């Protein structure tokens, strides 16, 4: 009995091995396991991390571009005021090619003299103070107090771009601070230079040391300054060449005028010399006639003396 019982399992397995479906079934199971392992390995880096929702996992598509971080994206130049709807421009940037009205609006009266504005002034419509914000992200390069301009903040940005904020009442930053676009720099205030504008902030924008009109670049990317900068340099060269040509023309005109003056002076000197010669000739002529006149006068004197003598002799003989 024991031998029969011990041989029973072996007989059962041997019977299973003899089945036609046994080995195909084994192959299918092994293949399924291999496929499962491969799929699991491929999706291993796409498994959501602990603490995150399954919907947060992002699978990059075939045609997706590399995403840039927000700090690396190019910023648009913004107005330096927190509430733009309540702000208005009270002083414009002076441009020589602007119309007369715009040029007059870009003049600042101080100490009975007019000065050309190198930036623009913002004031609130309700004539109250307001928050002044950073037009671009950057580093605070300088904070100072100016007797004419009030508190001043200068910020440095990439590509040699700088922004300038003056006539501040309170300053909320210090030198060396890293400031993001829209952060508060201070509040608008009064200053002696531009005191007619009341509570205001004076804002300037420059590229490589050249002041530009901020109004033309608001809501524009900083890359716009590169193209316009090249244009400004070209215009500056053209203006310099025009001024040089004008100066040369003016010098030539002055030289011609000086030559005419010298010619006139030479002609006048010749006329004076001729006149002097004529006067000298007249004087010589008078001197030549002078002896003859003296002889005539002497003859007349002799005749008069002789007449007087004869009259005296006749008188004496009559009395005798």
Image (cartoon, grey):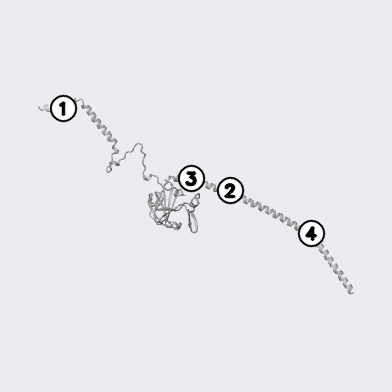
**Disc 1 to disc 2, how far (Cα)?**
121 Å
Q: Earlier in the sequence, mark 4 or mark 3?
A: 3
The residue beneath circle 3 is 231
Q: Is residue 301 above or below residue 201?
A: below
Q: Secondary structure at mark 4?
A: helix
305 on left or right of 274? right
Q: Can residue 260 be seen at all in this image of the molecule?
A: yes
Figure quadrant of residue 33 = top left
Query: Residue at the location (85% across, 68% down)?
Result: 307
Inter-mark Cα distance, 4 to 2? 60 Å
Question: Badges 1 and 2: C-beta atoms under 8 Å apart?
Answer: no
Disc on res. 289: 4
The location of residue 35, given as percent across then percent down, is 26, 32
Relative to residue 19, is residue 140 depicted above or below?
below
Tag in front: 4 or 3: 3
Neighbourhood count class around disc 1 (C-alpha, 10 Å): few under 14, some 14–19, many 20 upward: few
Q: Quadrant of residue 1?
A: top left
- The C terminus appears in which quarter of the rendering? bottom right
Callout count: 4
Which mark sits nearer the N-terminus, 1 or 2? Answer: 1
Q: Earlier in the sequence, mark 1 or mark 3?
A: 1
Residue tagged 2: 249
Closer to the camera: disc 1 or disc 2? 2
Q: Position of residue 231 (x, y in %)?
A: 48, 45
Secondary structure under tag 3 reads helix
Q: State the mark number for residue 185.
A: none
Q: Is residue 148 visible in this depiction of the protein? A: no
Mark 4 → mark 3, Cα distance in angstroms: 86 Å
| Cα–Cα gap, marks 1 and 3 | 95 Å
Structural distance between the alpha carbons of marks 3 and 2? 27 Å
Cα distance in 3D space between marks 4 and 1: 180 Å
């Amino acid at each position: 009995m024991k031998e029969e019982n011990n041989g029973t399992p072996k007989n059962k397995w041997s019977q299973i091995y003899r089945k036609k479906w046994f080995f195909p079934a084994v192959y299918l199971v092994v293949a399924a396991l291999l496929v499962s392992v491969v799929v699991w390995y491929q999706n291993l880096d796409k498994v959501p991390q602990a603490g995150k929702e399954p919907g947060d996992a992002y699978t990059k598509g075939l045609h997706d571009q590399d995403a840039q971080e927000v700090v690396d994206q190019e910023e648009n130049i913004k107005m330096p005021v927190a509430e733009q709807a309540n702000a208005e421009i009270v002083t414009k940037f002076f441009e020589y090619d602007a119309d007369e009205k715009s040029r007059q609006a870009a003049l600042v009266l101080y100490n009975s003299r007019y000065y050309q504005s190198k930036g623009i002034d913002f004031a609130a419509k309700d004539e109250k103070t307001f928050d002044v914000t950073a037009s671009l992200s950057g580093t605070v390069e300088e904070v100072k107090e100016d007797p004419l301009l009030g508190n001043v903040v200068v910020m440095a940005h990439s590509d040699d771009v700088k922004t300038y904020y003056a006539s501040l009442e309170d300053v909320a930053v210090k030198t060396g601070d890293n400031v993001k676009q829209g952060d508060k720099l201070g509040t608008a205030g009064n200053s002696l230079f531009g005191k007619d504008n009341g509570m205001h902030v004076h804002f300037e924008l420059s590229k490589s040391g050249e002041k530009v009109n901020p109004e033309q670049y608001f809501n524009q990317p900083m890359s716009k300054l590169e193209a316009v900068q090249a244009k400004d340099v070209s215009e500056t060269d053209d203006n310099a060449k025009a001024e040089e040509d004008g100066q040369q023309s003016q010098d030539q005109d002055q030289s011609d005028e000086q030559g005419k003056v010298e010619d006139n002076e030479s002609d006048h000197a010749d006329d004076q010399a001729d006149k002097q010669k004529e006067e000298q000739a007249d004087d010589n002529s008078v001197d030549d006639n002078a002896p003859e006149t003296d002889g005539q006068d002497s003859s007349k004197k002799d005749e008069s003396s002789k007449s007087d003598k004869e009259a005296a002799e006749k008188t004496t003989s009559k009395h005798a």
